[in-house]
C-alpha cells in the first residue's frame, strides 16, 4: 500500500508542475524544444521542465516512451542503459530499476535508480508516466553503480486540441545524482541531456510511423 500512495502522490505533483507557470526560467532552447528550470521544493537541486510539440498522436509518442523491459525506450534513449521491473504492485504501478551510462565525458559515472512508477491516463487523453525514488529489498545499492535518487518526475503526453496528429510532450526531472559532482557539471548536464532526449524521441517517433 505504501508504494501505491507514494506513486499517486508523485502523479499529483507532476500534474501540479504542469499547471503551475510561476517561477520558470528558460535555460536552453533548440528549435521547438525548450527547457526551463526553477528551484526544487523536494531537494537542494533544480526542477527541470522540457516541452515540445511532437508530430504524432499521443499513442504513438507513448509507445516510444513507455517504461518497460526491452521496450523501445531502451533502444533510442541514450540516457537509459537498461530498465528492469523489480516488482509489479498493480496493473499500472511497478517498482523499477533504471541503469544509466556514464556521461559528461566520463565525469558522471554509471548510475542506477530505483523508483515506483505509475502509468496514468487522464480523461482528456493525456498519458503520463510518473515516478519517484523508493527503497526495495530486492534491489539494494550495487558496487558498480552510484545510486541516484529521482524526486517526482516523468512525462506527460498531452493531445493538442484540434490537432489529432500532434502531441505536447512535457517532461519533468529533478534528480539527485549523488556522488561528488561539481554543481556546474550537474546544472549544465540536465538541459543538454533533456534536449538530446527530445531530439532522439522525435527521430524514434518518425521511425515508428514509417
Image: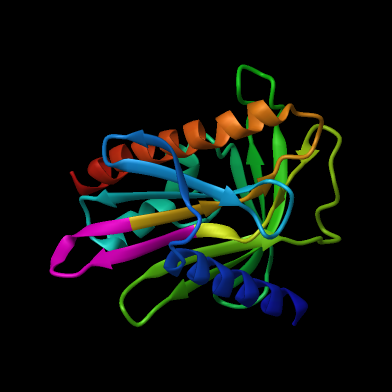
Q: Is residue 24 left or right of residue 45?
A: left
| Foreground of the two, 10 or 146 | 10
Q: How is the image coloured?
A: rainbow
| Foreground of the two, 169 or 67 | 169
Helix, strand or loop for the magenta stretch, by majority = strand
Count of all numbered marks drawn on residues in the image:
0
- Identify the image quadrant of the N terminus: bottom right
Residue 163 lies within the magenta run: yes
Q: In which image quadrant can residue 137 be found?
A: bottom right
Q: Relative to 202, say whether 60 is above or below.
A: below
Query: Residue visible at 71% across and 37% down?
Result: 111
Q: Is residue 178 left or right of residue 17?
A: right
Q: Residue 135 at x, y = what percent?
A: 81, 60
Q: Relative to 173, say whether 75 is above or below.
A: above
Q: In which image quadrant can residue 131 be found?
A: bottom right
Query: Residue visible at 71% across and 43% down?
Result: 112
- Identify the image quadrant of the C terminus: top left
- Name of the residue lying farthest toward the left: 162
Query: Residue visible at 75% across and 28% down?
Result: 181
| Foreground of the two, 106 or 30 | 30
Q: Is residue 162 left or right of residue 206?
A: left
Residue 40 lies within the magenta run: no
Q: Is residue 208 left or right of residue 18?
A: left
Q: Residue 74 at x, y = what percent?
A: 50, 42
Query: Residue visible at 63% across and 31% down?
Result: 101
Q: Residue 36 at x, y = what percent?
A: 46, 46
Image: magenta residue range: 155-168
- Name of the residue lying farthest toward the front: 23
Q: In which image quadrant can residue 188 be found?
A: top right
Amino acid at each position: 500500500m505504501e508504494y501505491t500512495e507514494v506513486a499517486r502522490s508523485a502523479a499529483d505533483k507532476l500534474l501540479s508542475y504542469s499547471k503551475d507557470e510561476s517561477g520558470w526560467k528558460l535555460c536552453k532552447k533548440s528549435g521547438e524544444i525548450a527547457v526551463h528550470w526553477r528551484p526544487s521544493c523536494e531537494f537542494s537541486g533544480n526542477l527541470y521542465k522540457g516541452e515540445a510539440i511532437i508530430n504524432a498522436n499521443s499513442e504513438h509518442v507513448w509507445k516510444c516512451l513507455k517504461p518497460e523491459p526491452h521496450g523501445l525506450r531502451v533502444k533510442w534513449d541514450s540516457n537509459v542503459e537498461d530498465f528492469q521491473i523489480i516488482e509489479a504492485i498493480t496493473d499500472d504501478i511497478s517498482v523499477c530499476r533504471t541503469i544509466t551510462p556514464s556521461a559528461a565525458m566520463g565525469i558522471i559515472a554509471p548510475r542506477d535508480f530505483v523508483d515506483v512508477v505509475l502509468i496514468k491516463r487522464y480523461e482528456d487523453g493525456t498519458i503520463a508516466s510518473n515516478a519517484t525514488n523508493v527503497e526495495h529489498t530486492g534491489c539494494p545499492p550495487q558496487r558498480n553503480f552510484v545510486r541516484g535518487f529521482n524526486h517526482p518526475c516523468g512525462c506527460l503526453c498531452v493531445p493538442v486540441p484540434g490537432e489529432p496528429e500532434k502531441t505536447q510532450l512535457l517532461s519533468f526531472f529533478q534528480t539527485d545524482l549523488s556522488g561528488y559532482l561539481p554543481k556546474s557539471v550537474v546544472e549544465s548536464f540536465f538541459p543538454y541531456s533533456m534536449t538530446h532526449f527530445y531530439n532522439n524521441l522525435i527521430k524514434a517517433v518518425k521511425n515508428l510511423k514509417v
